[in-house]
Image (tube, rainbow, N blue to C red):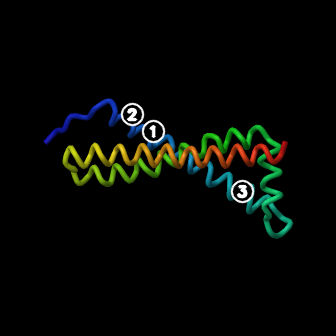
Amino acid sequence: MAEKVSNQSLLTWFLQRFSGLFLAIFLFTHIDVHHFLHRQGLINFAEVNERLAGSVGWKIFYIFFVPFCVFHALNGIWAILADYRPSGGFSASTKVVFWVVGLILTAIGALTLVNLFAVGV
C-alpha cells in the first residue's frame, strides 16, 4: 500500500542524513584531534578550552555541532515513535514536547559555548 509522503517528511529525512554525516565527521575529527594527535598524556580542560577559544574554525565547528546533534537525536526518536503510527493528539503533543526540549537543549549548548568562547578572550 502506497503512502503519501509530505514535503516535511522529505526534508526531515534529508536533514537526518545530513546531520548524521556531519556527526560522523565530528566523531572522526574528535578522535583524531583528542586521541591520536595528543601525545602528551592526559587531556585537561585548560588545553581543550585553549584550543576552542583560540580558533575561529573550532568555534564554527561547535556552533554547528550542537543543533545538529540535538536535531539528529530528537528526529531519530520521533522516527521510531512514528513507526508505531501514533494518534493525532499524541503525535501533535509529542512534536510540541520535542520542539520545546530541542530548543532548551540547543539554548543550553549555545550558552555553554558562549561562556567557553568568552574565557579565551
Amino acid of disc 1: Leu
Left or right: 99 as drawn, with respect to 70 = left
| Residue plotted at (40% across, 51% down) | 76
Determine the CA span between mark 3 and mark 1: 25 Å
Task: Give the residue at mark 3.
Answer: 32
| Residue plotted at (76% across, 44% down) | 117
| Residue plotted at (74% across, 48% down) | 116
Task: Give the residue at mark 1.
Answer: 15
Sequence-wise, which precedes: disc 3 or disc 1?
1
Could you tell me which quadrant the C terminus lies in? top right
Mark 3 touching mark 1, by CB under 8 A? no
Question: Of helix, strand and loop, which one carries label 1?
Answer: helix
Q: Position of residue 90 (x, y in %)?
A: 24, 49
Could you tell me which quadrant the N terminus lies in? top left
Q: Position of residue 49 (x, y in %)?
A: 79, 53
Figure label count = 3
Determine the CA span between mark 3 and mark 2: 31 Å
Mark 1 touching mark 2, by CB under 8 A? yes
Left or right: 108 as drawn, with respect to 97 = right
Asked if 38 appears above or below 74 in the picture, the reply is below
Tag in front: 3 or 2: 2
Asked if 45 appears above or below 51 in the picture, the reply is below
Q: Position of residue 80 (x, y in %)?
A: 32, 54
Which corner quadrant of the image does residue 34 belong to?
bottom right
Q: Mark 2, residues whose alpha carbon is within 10 Å: few (<14), some, or many (≥20)?
A: few
Left or right: 14 as drawn, with respect to 19 = left
Query: What residue occupies the far left of the structure in this picture?
Result: 1
Question: Of helix, strand and loop, which one carries label 3?
Answer: helix
Left or right: 59 as drawn, with respect to 92 = right
Task: Give the residue at mark 2.
Answer: 11
